[in-house]
Amino acid sequence: MKTCFPALMAAVLMPALALAQAPTTHSADDLAQKLADPGAALVSVPFQYNYLGDVGNGQHNQQLKIQPVIPFVGEHGKFLLRPILPYQWNEFPQHQQGLGDLFVQGYYIPTKPGEHSPTELGFGFAAMFDTANHDSLGTGKYSLGPAFVLVHKRGKWTMGALLNHVWSIGGHDAREDVSNTAMQPFFSRSLRDGWSFTLSSESSYNWEANSSDRWTVPLGGSVSKVLRIGKRPVSVGGGYYYNVERPTLASRWTARLTITLVFPE
C-alpha cells in the first residue's frame, strides 16, 4: 500500500499536540518516573531511532519510530492511545527505504475516584495497518487483537509488562498470514536529577514461522535524562539490546537513541 509519510505522520501527531498544554513546573524526577510508566496520563511524543546490526549476511537496517502517547482521562478510568509509525532504511532483505506498517495500541485502565493504587491493570486492543511503501517494509496485512498493560509502582521503582497478540483479518491474499504475540516486561529505576535506568525485553513469538524461527528475545537496557530546552521538558536517552534468541538472518543487536517531547498537564 502506498502511503504519504508526511500526511500519516501529521495524522498520528495531531491528537497528541491538540491535547498538549503549556509547559509547567513539574520536576525532572517526577517526569522521569511518569515517562517510565506506560499507564501514566502524560502526553508525550517519543522519536526512537534504532540501528539494527548484523542483519542477514552482515548488513544493517535502520528505523525511526514516531510513537506519541495520547491519554484521555475520565472519572472512572483513563484510555491511552499509543500509535507507532515507523520509517525504515533497510539493506536486508532488500535495499529499500520508506514507511512501514502503522501499529496502534489502545488501553483502558479503570480507576476509582480519589484512589491512587500502586498497581494498575488495563486492557484494550492492538491493530496493525498496511501502510508500508514496499512489500519488504511491511506485512501486507491488516491485523487486530487484544492488548493488556500491567504496571506496579513502589518508591522509585516502576515495573510491569505490555502484552498483545494480533491476527491478520485482511490484506493481500498472497502474503503470509499474521499471528504474532508481543511481550514487553520492564523494570525502571528513577535516579536523581531526572535520570532513570530501565531494563526491558521487547520479545515476540511468530506463530506462522518455522519452529526454529518463532522467538525473538532481545535483552538490554537504557539510560535517560529529563532536561529542559527553554521551558519545554525533553527526555534524551540511549540503549543497547542483544537478541539472545532470534530468527535466522534477523538482527543480532540493536542500538537505540530516543528523544521524547513531554507535554505535562
Image (cartoon, helix red, strand yellow):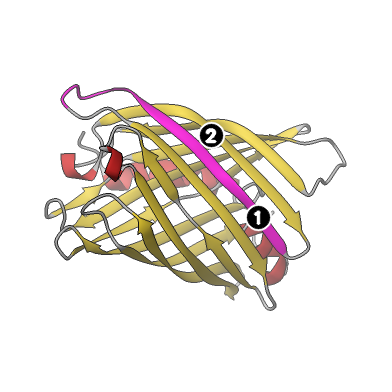
Q: Which of the labelled discs sits on residue 159, or is there none? A: 1
Task: Work out which residue is located at the far left of the displayed protein and give it.
Answer: 95
Whether residue 158 is in magenta: the answer is yes
Q: Position of residue 32 (x, y in %)?
A: 64, 65
Please tell me which residue is depicted at 45% across the width and 38% down the height of the picture.
Answer: 104
> Quarter of the image containing the C terminus?
bottom right
Q: Is residue 100 above or below residue 53?
A: above
Give residue 213's quadrant in the image: top left
* Residue 244 position within the rendered picture, expressed as x and y whole percent measured from the top left: 38, 59
Q: Secondary structure at mark 1?
A: strand
Q: Considering the whole magenta stretch, tell me its main secondary structure.
A: strand
The structure residue drawn at horizontal position 56% and vertical position 51%, both measured from the top left corner, is 185
Image point (19%, 21%), residue name: 173
Instruction: Report the magenta residues as a range.
Output: 157-174
Q: Is residue 134 visible?
A: no
| Crowd rating for badge 2 (residues with CA inside 10 Å; few <14, some 14–19, many 20+) | many
Earlier-in-chain disc, 2 versus 1: 2
Question: What mark, if any, has residue 200 been given in the picture?
Answer: none
Residue 226 in the figure: left or right of residue 86: right
> Magenta span has 100?
no
